[in-house]
């Protein structure tokens, strides 16, 4: 989950250098003796709106690792929001420690108080090791929280919206590469049939794709294969399969020195976060192999779009789905930009995101 290189680690001496290098606005260290809470909230950029991003709880081996992770993740949220046309900025929080041992009502509410102290500059949501129940506790102390259950006016599980956006992004890639968005009869391998992967398979099955699936959970494989007529593949055989589209929906960093030379597909389009082990190197390696890549933070933005719609108020699932449909055009736009300027799709996406922040930043005149 945490794949930080030693060279990336932020040292005590370099904190402000790192903040200015990556353009962070504010980093808040939160500590509470009574509950044992240690958290870091990073606000990367608020030009487009308040910084929205989930809270991740992880047993980091060092505090440096936690700081590096939150700085990197919050910056990623800025680009994800900007490229998705949302009027929010990028932020993220990490809580240091073992979720199974530390989490309690008091612990989460204390964290909620810290979120509240930022007065809405940062809005939190779920991420790794955070559950809807935790968001409910945070909500007892602050209104600046999303990811609440539908019964409380929240957006509920974002996975179906993420899967829907990924499905449309995949269709846009097919349009670009094959000249038709149809996925009928296309051989598609979905790696990871968890929450997002399973819903994605459902869309693909409806369209008549030939679906292969892999997972480390026998139970999930059995369930999804049975329901949607997908064929199960061994976990380590997935990269060698003759396929049209590879859809990573499990782990990060699966596009690396080992897997890219083995891939026989023409498109990579899936929902997993941080798919490229090394953003630049592996982005270009895919181009050299003639494989079109849908940048992960663009194609998987459905989850953020879902919580954004919750933040707008009066959550409406149809509105969230309509909003997620825009992922199709974003993916096509990025593919054109990448081709025209001979840069990787990842770089093209970041360039477009930065441009939107810059353009909208100029629109916001003082009163
Ligand atoms: P999940 O935990 O429900 O599903 C992940 C699945 O991957 C599980 O079934 C797990 O058994 C499987 N898996 C783990 N290791 C594997 C391996 N080595 N090979 C094959 N399968 C393996 O998670 P999810 O919510 O479906 O998210 C999937 C990915 O999409 C993650 O990378 C997540 O960060 C990203 N994502 C999810 C959302 C969302 O709305 N849930 C939004 C944006 C991005």
Image: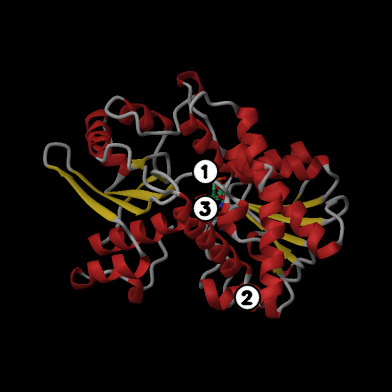
Q: Residues within 10 Å of mark 1 (few under 14, many from 20)?
A: many
Q: Which of marks 3 and 1 is nearer the N terminus?
A: 3
User: Do callouts 3 and 1 mark residues in contact (Cβ within 8 Å)?
Assistant: no
Q: Can residue 232 be seen in this view?
A: no
Q: Residue furthest left?
A: 33
Q: Name the residue under label 3.
A: 82
Q: Which residue lies furthest to the front in this view?
A: 367
Q: Could you tell me residue 111's position as x and y percent?
A: 25, 38
Q: Name the residue under label 1.
A: 304
Q: Could you tell me residue 48's position as x and y percent?
A: 45, 48
34 or 120, which is in the foreground?
120
Q: Element at badge 1?
A: helix
In the image: residue 172, left or right of residue 275: right
Q: Is residue 168 above or below residue 9?
A: above
Q: Earlier in the sequence, mark 2 or mark 1?
A: 1
Q: Could you tell me residue 281's position as x and y percent?
A: 55, 78
The quadrant the N terminus occupies is: bottom left
205 or 172, which is in the foreground?
172
The CB of the residue at mark 1 lies under 8 Å from ligand 1? yes
Q: Which of marks 2 and 3 is nearer the N terminus?
A: 3
Question: How far, Cα to Cα, is label 3 from label 1?
Answer: 11 Å
Rendered image quadrant of residue 110: top left
The residue at 38%/72% (across/down) is 5
In the image: residue 11, left or right of residue 122: left
């Amino acid at each position: 989950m945490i794949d930080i290189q030693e060279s990336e680690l932020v040292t005590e001496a370099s904190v402000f250098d790192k903040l200015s290098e990556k353009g962070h606005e504010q980093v808040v260290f939160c500590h509470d003796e009574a509950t044992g809470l240690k958290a870091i909230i990073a606000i990367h950029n608020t030009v487009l709106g308040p910084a929205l991003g989930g809270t991740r709880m992880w047993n980091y081996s060092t505090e440096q690792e936690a700081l590096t992770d939150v700085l990197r993740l919050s910056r990623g949220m800025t680009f994800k929001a900007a490229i998705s046309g949302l009027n929010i900025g990028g932020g993220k929080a990490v809580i240091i420690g073992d979720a199974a041992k530390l989490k309690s009502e008091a612990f989460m509410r204390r964290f909620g108080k810290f979120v509240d102290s930022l007065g809405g500059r940062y809005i939190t949501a779920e991420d790794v090791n955070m559950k809807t129940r935790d968001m409910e506790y945070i909500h007892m102390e602050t209104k600046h929280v999303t990811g609440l259950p539908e019964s409380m006016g929240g957006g509920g599980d974002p996975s179906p919206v993420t899967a829907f956006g990924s499905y449309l992004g995949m269709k846009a890639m097919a349009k670009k590469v094959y000249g038709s968005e149809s996925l009928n009869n296309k051989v598609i391998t979905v790696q990871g049939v968890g929450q997002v992967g399973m819903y994605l398979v459902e869309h693909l099955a409806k369209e008549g794709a030939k679906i292969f699936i892999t997972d480390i959970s026998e139970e999930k494989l059995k369930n999804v294969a049975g329901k949607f007529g997908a064929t199960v593949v061994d976990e380590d055989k997935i990269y060698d399969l003759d396929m049209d589209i590879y859809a990573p929906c499990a782990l990060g960093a699966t596009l690396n020195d080992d897997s890219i030379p083995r891939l026989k597909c023409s498109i990579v389009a899936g929902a997993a976060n941080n798919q490229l082990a090394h953003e630049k190197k592996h982005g270009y390696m895919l181009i050299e192999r003639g494989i079109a890549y849908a940048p992960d933070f663009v194609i998987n933005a459905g989850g953020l779009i879902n919580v954004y719609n919750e933040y707008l108020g009066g959550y409406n699932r149809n509105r969230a789905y309509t909003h997620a449909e825009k992922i199709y055009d974003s993916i096509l736009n990025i593919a054109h930009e990448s081709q025209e300027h001979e840069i990787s799709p990842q770089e093209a996406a970041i360039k477009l995101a930065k441009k939107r922040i810059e353009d909208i930043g100029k629109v916001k005149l003082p009163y």
